[in-house]
Image: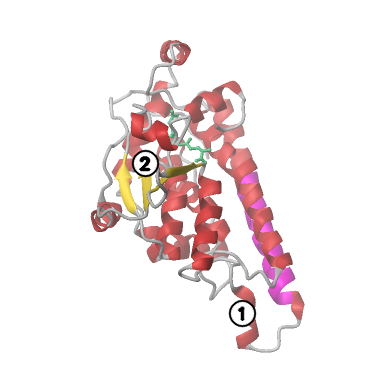
Amino acid sequence: MATSSPATDSGKTYHRECTGDALETVSKHQDPQSITLFGSCFCPFVQRVWVAFEYLGIPYQYYEVDPYKKPKDLLEVSPKGLVPGLKLNDYIPPKALNESTVILEYLEDLASNTTKRSLLPPVTNPYARALVRLQADHISRNLVPAFYRLLQAQDLEAQVQGAKEYYIALEGVVNLFERAEEEIISAGGVSGEGERRALTIGLGLWVEGGDLGWADVMAGPWLFRTTNVLKHYRGFELWAGDKFNAWLDRLVSHPAFKATCSTEDLYLDSYERPVINLRSRVYESLCECRYAHNRPNTSQVANAINSGRGLP
Ligand SMILES: N[C@@H](CCC(=O)N[C@@H](CS)C(=O)NCC(=O)O)C(=O)O
């Protein structure tokens, strides 16, 4: 369950370069391509998009940026200076896209015309697609904000409450996965293995024998950070359900996901700054001050959660 944060700030800060498997992937994606992915090694919103590039087989050049410094080339592709951003180099002049969920939709459309891969159930099964979108909606509106509320909760009471809310959000994901499996596969009177396999398409790794799906990509980066960042800073343990754990194992070891993962230290170091520093009221007022002067290196996500606003 929740515990309070480590008492001291060791001064670690976010990394500016990937490590481990992610670094290897970056090194394979340095040549110019039609699409440049503006990413940051620690960012879960970037990881979402990055996993989709890998899974859908869309060529890209990876370009590491520091979103807290707001370099000009990042602002050109993402008006708020948030990562991820895409630069679409085939247009003259180049065009741009931002917002992880919009980018995901774009990549899905692109792949349907090129690599023919997809993270969603086929268009011939609109109800299955809608159920997957319900999962994605819950992940965006409940799971991701609950993750940050727990991570940024400072006193023990708020952390316990945050942990409860995060469990409830996780349970909501599981219920929606179960619903899709039940309604699309189990209740359909499936006659053979071939039909079962066809129906699992796009339902994601929750279903045994399934492949990576839309909701896996939407939630995966935060689930992964639950196993390292939330565990380390909040003592948060995921419940021991066999099916849940088997799903999570399949997800974090899926080649497209693994290819985008840095080593654990990168995530622990990168989240120390908001987590520990926000404990101190003195630092909180400094943060406010930086924000008011619109200086970089104040997280828009952290500010939104602190003030109860929706995520940027
Ligand atoms: N809604 C955005 C959120 C992206 C986001 O918040 N990215 C963070 C890094 S994880 C960022 O760029 N932060 C810079 C800042 O807060 O100024 C999306 O889904 O793409």
Residue 171 among those drawn in magenta: yes
Q: Give the answer, above or below, for where 301 lies relative to 93.
A: above
Left or right side of 301 for 143: right
Residue at the disc numbered 1:
198
> Element at badge 1?
helix
Q: Secondary structure at mark 2?
A: loop
On whether ligand 1 comes within 8 Å of the CB at mark 2, the answer is yes
Residue 94 spot, x, y in % from top left: 40, 44
Q: Quadrant of residue 192?
A: bottom right
Q: What residue occupies the far front of the structure in this picture?
A: 92
Q: Earlier in the sequence, mark 2 or mark 1?
A: 2
Colouring method of the image:
secondary structure
- Residue, x 28% and y 56% (percent of image)? 29
Is the residue marked by circle 2 packed among few (<14), some (14-19), or many (20+) residues within 10 Å? many
Q: Give the Cα distance between marks 2 and 1.
A: 36 Å
Q: Residue at x 52, y 63 (%)?
A: 247
Q: Which mark is residue 42?
A: 2
Q: Give percent across and percent down for residue 64.
A: 30, 42
- Single out the residue that lies furthest toward the bottom: 192
